[in-house]
Each structure stands twice: as C-alpha cells, then as structure tokens.
Amino acid sequence: MKLGLQLAQNPAAPEEIAQAARAAEQRGYASLWVSDHLLLPAAGSPLPPLEIMEPVVLLSYAAAVTRTIRLGTSVLVLPYRNPVHLAKELATLAIVSRGRLIAGVGSGWLEAEFRALGASYPRRGAFTDEAIRLMRTLWASEEAQFKGEFFEFESMRFGPRPPAGSIPIWVGGQSRRAIRRALELGDGYHGSRLTAEELSVRLRWLRDAAAARGRGLDGFALTHRVYLGFADRWTETGGYFRGVLAPPDRLADYLNRFARLGIEEMVIVPLGAASRLESFLDRFEREVRPRLD
C-alpha cells in the first residue's frame, strides 16, 4: 500500500511547508496533497473558520522544492471555478512539476460557500460533470470545440497542454452519483473520512457499476484519505476532522483494513501534528509503517 501525506495549509512560514514536502519525499511517501476551500462561514459550519492557502499555488511551491513525489488535490471543488481557467492552471502545474500532478476533484458540499461564491448548489453535479469533460477536451486538443449546458465554443486554441495531453483525474465524494462520476469520467476514486465499513459500501457500488457496464477496474486508482494521530487508547474524532487517535499497533490495523478492501494508496492527514510533523513522521516510520500490509 502506498502512502501519501497531506500538507498543512495554514499560513505558516514557507520554509516549514518546504521542509514538510522534502521530508515526505525523502521518507518515501508517494504523494503530497492539499485541500480546497475559498470562503468559510464565520459561525454555524461543520468547519471552523480556518485560513486555508490556495491549493494550486501551494502545490506549485511544493513542486519547486521537490523532485519526484507526486502532487495532488484532495479535492478541488469544480463548481467554484471557471473550468477553462482551472484547466490552464492545472496544465501549467503539470508542466512545471514534470508530470507529477493528480487532479482530485469533486462537486462540493458546503452550501454557504456556494452561495457566497455565486455558484449553483442545486446544479453542482451537472457542472462538475461538464467541467471534467471540458478540461479533458482542452488538454487533449490543439484546436478545441465544446458544446455543453454551461460552456460552448468552436475552434479555440488552448495551450500549453499538459504532458501526454492529459492529467489523471481522481473523483471524490460519497454519493452514488459521485461513484458513477468517478467510473464514467475519472481515472480513479478518492474517498475521504469514511470508515472501512462505509468505504466498503462505496467500493461495492463502484464494482457493481463497472460490472453493469462490462468493464474491469484495471488501471483505475482506488485511494482514500484518513485523519489519524497517536494516543494511548483508541479514540474516534468527530465532525469534519473525523478520524482516529490510537496506539501505533491499532493505527496499523486501522490502515490495513483499507488495504484489504483493495485501496492502493492512503493519504494521511496528521491530527494534532501541524507544529510537530517531523516527530509524527518519525514515530509513524518506526512504529506503524513496518506493520502495514
């Protein structure tokens, strides 16, 4: 099982972010990840009013201070952005990172954020589907044309395009529609904050949908993001930062449950470790990683 690491996105000193990115690469992590929120309610939200740095810009910085580790978004909320502009940003990042980018995308869930941005919450699913198709069209074509519900154009040139004319897209979400979207439009499924039992249900939906279409899942990435940290006894955290605090052996058992479901890559979000990431990674390397399947 491969391991990814989520970067802290609070406005810490840039050298701390660079240090974390280099440390993950040196320790053999497969990928670095960042999340996405543009505006957060000051009160009454499942999320505290965090300051979260912009994901594409932050990954560009991470690309500049690393050489081989892959870079991913977990996940970009597509209805918040013009997909042509985003396609240009992601293509540029794919080029400067020498093809290391994974575009994790989703349709979003925080209705107050949609309203504040003037984005349609009821139509977010349809917009997300179209945005994925539009970006793929632009990345693949020297001269593109597109006709959809939200965007339409003919004979437009887009460039520069990403290496090989594509960027891997991993689709996030927990609904049946998100699962179908991943299968129909994505290169992988990227779950988040689900228990192994809950994820097992989503994977069953995915495999049933694939079987109904007469296709296999070879080459289709199965990935998941978890929040975890060390504690003397097993404790499940709630709210948006839903995860697990536990002794090292139980953390390993927890992660191995996902591996046994067929998850190929786990993205770790350290709980309570933003200011002491090195100590978290040191302990994880010594006491958890050797126990992983």
Image: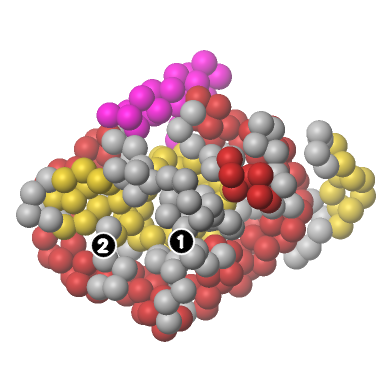
The magenta-colored residue range is: 197-220
Q: Based on the picture, tell me whether residue 139 belongs to the magenta stretch.
A: no
Mark seen at residue 50: 1
Asked whether residue 98 is in view, the answer is no
Asked whether residue 206 is in view, the answer is yes
Q: Which residue does the image show at 34% across and 44% down from the upper left?
A: 239
Magenta stretch: helix, strand or loop mostly: helix
Local secondary structure at mark 2: loop
> Seen from this angle, which residue lies furthest top?
212
Question: What residue sits right under mark 2 in the picture?
Answer: 272
Q: CA distance from mark 2 to mark 1?
A: 15 Å
Q: Which residue does the image show at 56% across and 65% down from the upper left?
A: 54
Q: Nearer the viewer, mark 2 or mark 1?
A: 1
Q: Which residue does the image show at 18% across and 51% down from the upper left?
A: 245
Q: Position of residue 129 (x, y in %)?
A: 67, 36
Q: Position of residue 271 (x, y in %)?
A: 27, 58
User: Relative to residue 59, is residue 291 depicted above or below?
Assistant: above
Q: Earlier in the sequence, mark 2 or mark 1?
A: 1
Local secondary structure at mark 1: loop
Q: Is residue 201 left or right of residue 85?
A: left
User: Relative to residue 208, is residue 28 depicted above or below?
Assistant: below
Crowding around mark 1 (Cα neighbors within 10 Å: few <14, some 14 to 19, many 20+) is: few
